């Protein structure tokens, strides 16, 4: 029987690395905490709440790490940031983190990342179905050409709708001057660190986060108070935008494959139509040939009959002449 447990406590770096690196196509959520850093009762409540969240998201893997009881160097995962902290990983890639004790924000971010991954998964499923349909079209014999052409048209329409549904451009979104200024500042920081950033992708990522509630626009924040209070939430906006760029880049790659698939299906449809026209022309030529042969046969039969009648007539005349 397959175990339905999806939450574990890890006490050494090797085990944590293996889980993060080898969990293919599963979102891994790691909570880093430390019993010595704040109230033990609060730590217990946090751990229990984390366990409750894991039961609601059974397709994800949840890891609990107490840094006070951890063998190894956690810097790969902690990056010297405050705890408690929730980190998200998918296929070894970090997708961002949430700091602080506000579990509502953590669950909101968890929902958002799961929805993005599900969207990409559905796109890939649609692409695989399209590939299967294409193979069926190529393997179908000539007797089903008309049906194949109809299926090809349906595939093209479905793929076009899919691409239109996932197509999102930052020009369609309205952002305030303050938001744009903040995004430009983030772009400069990324470029200064040797990264490569696109303003359009940063704007798009910002809009996606804003719509999901991950970024609160025009909210008043008291940084000094946040540092003193463990309820503080630090989304590390630069990192979040960069991670979302990865998701959007993956979506763009899938979208490009779908567009190529559409072009292939269109060409296949045109080829089928040309084959049908050629077959129709061959049938017409064959029909004309048979009609000509039938007409010639009738003419030959008529000539033979006329010749036979003439011969009979001659014999009849000759016979009468002999009697006389």
Image: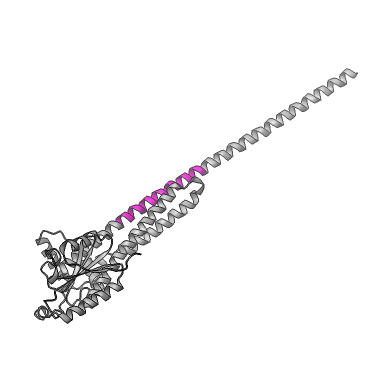
Q: Which quadrant of the view contains residue 69?
A: bottom left
Residue ID at (10%, 81%): 225
The answer to whether residue 177 of the structure is visible from this angle is no
Quadrant of the snapshot with the N terminus: bottom left
Q: Residue furthest right?
A: 324
Q: Is residue 158 left or right of residue 221?
A: right
Compared to residue 309, the image places residue 178 above or below, namely below
In the image, taking residue 75 as reference, residue 165 lies left or right, namely right
Please tell me whether residue 138 is drawn above or below residue 50 in the rendered image.
above
Residue 317 % position (x, y):
84, 22
Q: Which residues are magenta?
A: 255-279
Residue occupying the point 11% across, 58% down: 194
Residue 90 visible here: yes
Residue 136 x, y percent position in the rendering = 43, 50
Seen as rendered, the residue at the extreme front is 1
In the picture, measured across the screen, residue 179 lies left or right of residue 143, that is left
Depth check: give the residue in front, 150 or 124: 124
Q: Within the image, what quadrant is residue 83 found in?
A: bottom left
């Amino acid at each position: 029987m397959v175990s339905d447990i999806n939450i574990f406590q890890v006490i050494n770096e090797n085990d944590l690395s293996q889980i993060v690196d080898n969990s293919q196509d599963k979102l891994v959520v790691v909570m880093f905490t430390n019993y010595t850093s704040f109230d033990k009762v609060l730590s217990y409540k946090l751990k229990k709440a984390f366990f409750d969240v894991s039961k609601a998201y059974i397709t994800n893997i949840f890891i609990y790490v107490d840094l006070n009881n951890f063998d190894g160097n956690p810097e790969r995962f902690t990056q010297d940031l405050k705890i408690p902290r929730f980190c998200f990983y998918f296929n070894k890639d970090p997708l961002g983190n949430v700091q602080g004790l506000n579990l509502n924000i953590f669950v909101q971010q968890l929902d958002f990342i799961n929805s993005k991954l599900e969207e990409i998964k559905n796109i890939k499923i649609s692409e695989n179905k399209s590939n299967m349909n294409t193979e069926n079209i190529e393997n179908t014999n000539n007797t089903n050409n008309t049906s194949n052409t109809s299926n090809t048209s349906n595939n093209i329409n479905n793929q076009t709708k899919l691409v239109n549904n996932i197509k999102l451009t930052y020009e369609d979104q309205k952002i305030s001057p303050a938001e744009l200024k903040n995004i430009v500042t983030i772009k400069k920081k990324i470029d200064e660190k040797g990264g490569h950033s696109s303003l359009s992708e940063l704007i798009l990522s910002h809009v996606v986060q804003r719509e999901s509630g991950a970024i609160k626009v025009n909210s008043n924040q008291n940084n000094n108070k946040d540092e003193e209070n463990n309820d503080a939430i630090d989304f590390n906006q630069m990192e979040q935008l960069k991670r979302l760029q990865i998701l959007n880049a993956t979506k763009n790659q899938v979208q490009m494959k779908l567009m190529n698939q559409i072009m292939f299906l269109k060409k296949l449809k045109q080829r089928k139509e040309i084959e049908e026209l050629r077959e129709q022309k061959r049938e017409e030529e064959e029909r004309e040939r048979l009609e000509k042969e039938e007409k010639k046969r009738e003419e030959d039969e008529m000539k033979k009959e006329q010749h036979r009648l003439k011969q009979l007539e001659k014999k009849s005349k000759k016979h009468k002449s002999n009697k006389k």
